[in-house]
Every structure is written in structure tokens, then in C-alpha cells.
Image (cartoon, coloured by chain):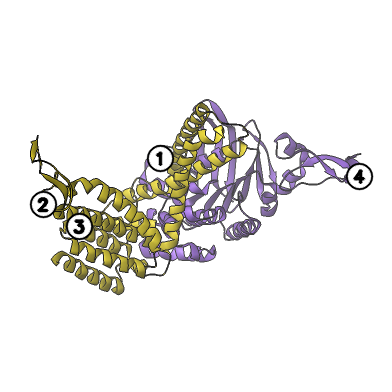
Amino acid sequence: MADILRLENITYRYHNMIPALDNVSLSVQRGERLAVIGSNGCGKSTLLHIMNALIFPQSGEVYLEGQQATEKRLKEKAFVHFFRQRMGYLFQDPDVQLFCPTVFDELLFGPLQLGLTQEESTARVLEIMAMLQMENLKDRPSYMLSGGEKKRVALGAVLTMNPDILLLDEPGNGLDPRSYSLLVELMVALSEAGKTIIVATHDLSLIGELGCRVVVLSEQHRVEKTGSAEEIIGDEELLLRVNLIHEHVHYHGSSVHRHVHSHYLFHRHNHKESCEE
Amino acid sequence: MAGHSRLAFLDRGLLAVSRLLKDTYVQWDLSSKKGLFQCFDPRLKLLFLIFFAVAISLKRDLFSEIVVMVMLLGFSLLSRLPLVAVYSRTIALGFVFGVLVSFPSACNVIVPGTVVFPLVTLTGSHDLLFYHIPRTIGFTREGLQLVALLSLRVVNSLTLCTLVLYTTPFPDLIKALRLFHLPSVVILIITLFHKYVFILACSLEEMHLSMKSRLMSSFTSAGARTWATDRMAYIYRKTHRTCEDVFGGMLSRGFTGEVRLTESAPLSRLNWIAGSALLALWFIVILL
């Protein structure tokens, strides 16, 4: 399968000083599910920003369908249209993504900017609203929504643009269990519909549920390892090294337990072996 | 309770922030009710506001202002607005900006006229600079009428604004501004401004509460000022960072400098009928 997105030797420093990414290379195939995982501050969100051409690296190249995305090319109307139509970005904080008067306007914004007619855009919006079960939010302003609703609207705003690639930055953050499982189901459905899904997360249960290819970023902002979800989740030594799981001590009655632990997936330990009376 | 009193200025400031948040929720709640004005298109209500604001300012007799007042009371009732809350606020402001500001003009030292309530009787009249001080100083009929007229104008104008604001969701009101051919980008800026005032007000309230929850001893005035200044700087930095993030969010959704927003739907028949009726009312008020 052809690469839909390719990043070559990306290095990025905030204000030319603070390292965020160091010589990161990766490629994503059309229709693939890819997760970028790593601890806080390892550069996951920066990587997604670079993929979406919101910021540009000091060195390295980004290719979308073989076409290089540079700052200069992003000023060409035709290329912007080509680029933005193919890539949708769900931000970690939905508040920065919602800027229109109402939810309905929010969902219409993307299609209208892409040059769709009012009728085409409205039809698309109604379809997405039904899919995400948010018809009741239609006339609400975004600041009157709950955290989960905001996330749903932000995702809807991306989906109305019908992008080929979905960049999702910590999509499960702040969601209640029901909204979370709805989100996972939706991601699976989108993947089955042929969309390329790229998720930045430190939620190990999400990558397990998506069964995706995983790129692990180290705290030194480099690609530490790439592999399948099972392979990465099974590598406790790697996860400890990149600070995704940690040593944990707690009580079971009067017994003290010490074991590796992740708040999302792992709570695996042999009580008898790890017990310290 | 030294600590408490030193935090009073912070508490008062934050109380105002809480009121702003509460007002936003109240406004949303009232505008979602089923009432007369809630059924009207926001563009129609915006025109109603402008036309009647002009009428209220133009009328120079008490009778017309009373007619407008009764009409607005009727509309408020039919729109299921909480009359006590609406009128207590408008009458209080009417008292301050209408009665108190214009009250001196009720006296014949400022506005000559027929004295109806004499206050002081002097030995003779005097001229002081450009003031003529008559022998009998008191409230004149003309002066009192002027005070009543100004007070009614203030109350009517405020009731008119409240009626439109409380029956229209704020985002719809902003969108209705397109009636005046405001560019889409301006509409977007006003929307963002309103949204972020709300979000930052929420942050401010939470920061204040978190500070209070950790405060165990008295807070010195200097400490309170330092905290307030520090939080202002924090809010400024947060605003700046959010501004960049929002711009990124707009870019990622296809923003290229030109904004295309939803086209306004044509007015329904109900709104045309309501508009005609309101226009007829306006003519009646003008002709009174």
C-alpha cells in the first residue's frame, strides 16, 4: 500500500531552543491505524501539529500523498485546499477548535471553507449530527456544552470535512466511560470505512482497543520503537523506560504490594510473589 | 477576621465575575423558553430594538413614554420574562440615570417654570453668573415633567434591550448583525470575544476558589494584591497562548483569511406578519 503521509528526519525546537522532536521519521499507509505514544512532553502533540502543517520543523520534510508540505506551498490556495481537505485534526482541548456562534455553524464551517455549497454543506452536517447523536445540541453555543459534548462537536466539525486522514490528539481525555466507548466504536467504524487514523495518546488501553501500529516516542523526543499494539504493550521494559508505566506500591489489607502499573491498562501483578508483609 | 476583610476586594471582583456567568446562563435559559418574542427571528428583534430605541428618544411627552412602557410590559409578560427581576434592575438603573442625574433640573434655578412645590422663599430674586435665582425656589411642573420623561426614557430603553437580549440566544443575536452587512470575519471575532470572556471568567472563578480552599491563615493586603496581579498576568499569557491555538484550529479547518459563514435563511411568513405588526405599532407611537 502507498504511503499517504511521510515524515523524514523531523527536528523541532520551540523558540529554536527547547527540543520537542529529534530526528523523527515515520510513514503512514492509506487506511492504517497508527498511535503515537509517549509520556507527557515527549512531543506527541508537536508531531501532530507538524503533520497538520500548523507549525514547520527546523529540519526535515513532510509529504502528503507524495507532495511536500512546506510553509511556502501552504500559502498557495490550491495546495491549502488539497491539504486541508485530506487532513482533519481533533485538538486535545476542544475549546480552541470551536469558534463559531452555534454547534450547527461549527459543523458547517469546514465544508463552507472547502467551497461546498450551503445545501451540500447542510446535508453533510445533518448526516454527521445524526451519526454522532447530537441533533439536540444544534443551536447551542459551544461554551454551553459539557466536556464530552464539546469533544463530540469538535470531532463532528472534523468529520464534516470528510478528511482521508484523521489526526486525533488525546481523543479520550476527559470523556466519561460511555462517551469513551462511543468514541472507540466510532474510530473503529471510521477505520473500516477506509479512513487513516493517527492518534497521539498516553492511554495504553486505547491502542489495545484499536489494535493499531504504535510509534513510541522517548522522553528524549526520538522514536524509541515501532511495532504492533501487542508487541509494544507486552514490552514492559520499554514502557518503563519511556515512562508509560511505573513502579507502584499499595496495600491489599495488611499486605504491601509493589509492581509495575499503568493507570490505563496494567494492573497486573502476582499478589503472592510481590507481597511484602 | 482580618484575612476576610483583606480579601474583600477580591471577593467583590469575583462576585461580579460569578454574576456575569450566572447572567449568561439565565439569558440562555430565558431565550430557550416558549414565548412571544422567542418565536421571532433575531433579525426582526434587532430591527425592533433599533426602531423603538429611536422612537423612545424622539418622543417628548410623558403619554407616549407611558404607552411604550405598557407595550413593553405586555411584550415581557407574553415572552414569559421574570418581571420582578427585569423591572427591579431597569427601575433601579432608571432611578440612578434618570431621577438622580436629572433631579436638579426639576428646580426652577435650572429650568424656569411654574413652581408646584416651593422649598425656600428669599427676600428677592438674584442673578449669579448665568443663573437667575428667583425669589421662590422650588420644584416646577416643567422640571418634574422633564425628570419623569428622562426617567421613563431610561427605563423604557433598558426594558427594550432586556426584552431583546433575554429572548434571543446571544449567538443568534451576533449572527443577526449580518443584517447590517458586517463582514463574516467581524462576526467571528465578536463570537470569539464573547466565548473567551465566558471561558476566562470561568477560569478566574476557579482560580479564586482554589486559592480560597488552600488559604489557612490571614492574607495580607499586599499578598492579595500580589495574587491578583499574578493571576492577571497568568490570564494574559493564557489568552495569548489560546489565541495562537485557536488560530491553529481555524487553519486546520480550512481558514485561509476569508471566512464563509452560514447564509441567513429567509424570514418566515410568521415573522413577516409579526414584523408588519411591530412596524404598525412603531408608527402609532411616532404619531402619538
Answer few, some or many: residues within 10 Å of disc 4's Cα (few below 14, many 20 plus, some between 14 and 19).
Answer: few
Q: Amino acid at mark 4?
A: Lys
Q: Position of residue A45 (x, y in %)?
A: 56, 40
Kindly report which numbered mark, 3 or 1, lies closer to the viewer in this rendering.
3
Q: Give the foreground label among 1 and 2.
A: 2
Other residues around mark 2 within 10 Å, as few (<14) / some (14–19) / many (≥20): some
The answer to whether tags 2 and 4 share a subunit is: no
For the residues marked 1 and 2, what is the alpha-carbon distance in whole angstroms?
77 Å
Q: Colour of chain A?
A: purple
Q: Which chain is yellow?
A: B
Q: Is residue B266 above or below residue A96?
A: below
Quadrant (top left, top right, bottom left, bottom right) of the C terminus of chain B: bottom left
Residue B68 occupies which quadrant of the picture?
Answer: bottom left
The answer to whether mark 4 and mark 3 are in CB contact below 8 A is no
Numbered mark located on residue A73 in the image: 1
Residue that badge 2 annotates: B113
Left/right placement of residue A141 relative to residue A238 reads: left
Identity of the residue furthest to the front in this view: B123
